[in-house]
Amino acid sequence: MNYDDYPPMHDSPDSPIQLEGQLLIADPSLRSGLFNKSVILLAEHQSDEGAYGLILNHPTGQTVGELLKNDEFDALKNIHVHLGGPVGQEHLTFAAFWTQDNQQLRFATRISAEDATTRTQQPGTLIRAFAGYSGWTPGQLEGELRKNSWIPTHPSTELLAGDHEQDLWARLLRSISPYHQILAEAPDDIFVN
């Protein structure tokens, strides 16, 4: 990944930024709160409607089986629940990830437990569960991007392999450039030796 892969950031607030389908890696300056070391899949983004995304790397320590006791959801019971964001944390939703013939990562978000159960039968499909989501009002995300709060990057099919745990942030950051590797390996408090 190199800097040419990033969407252009313009100084004009009217310049459109299209990031739907990309990952937002929290800049190390976002040290406090829920977005600290977050990786967000930006599932929807329209400059005039706002944006919707899911934090991929904040596990809650719970599984779907602890929250949905109905036998019809047994195929989902061992899926770990992640905190998708600060909005609507009382709601459980699902997302499916897969690749197409051209090896591009595809996804479907806001799917029901019934749909997620059906998709578990599709080979090569990864199902994730989320409590809550991340949302931005029109223009809010664009403002945060212009303040360099997020590092946008294109997801690779490697996102289907391995767990989406807290170390995902550092792994993705390291893959961008040597500078980002230094940021990923820096201690949380740079003043502590």
Image: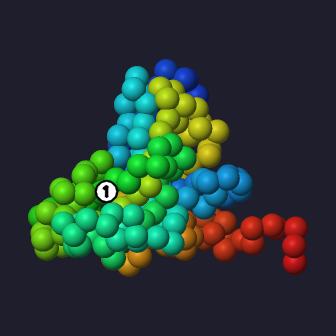
Where residue 188 appears, as percent x and y from the top left, is 75, 67
Task: Choose between 56 and 77: the one closer to the eye.
Answer: 77
Q: In which quarter of the image is residue 145?
A: top right
Q: Which amino acid does label 1 sit on?
A: Phe
Where residue 35 appears, as percent x and y from the top left, is 60, 53
Residue named by callout 1: 94
* Residue displayed at 53% across by 56% down: 25
Task: Choose between 87 and 72: the one closer to the eye.
Answer: 72
Q: How is the image coloured?
A: rainbow
* Residue displayed at 41% across by 76% down: 163
Q: In this view, does 93 lie to the left or right of 83?
A: left
* Residue displayed at 50% across by 43% down: 87
Local packing at callout 1 (Cα closer than 10 Å; few below 14, some 14-19, many 20+) is many
Q: In this view, does 129 lie to the left or right of 33?
A: left
Task: Choose between 21 and 14: the one closer to the eye.
Answer: 21
Q: Is residue 78 left or right of residue 56?
A: left
* Residue displayed at 54% across by 23% down: 13
Q: In the figure, 41 relative to 160: above or below? A: above
Tag 1, which secondary structure?
A: strand
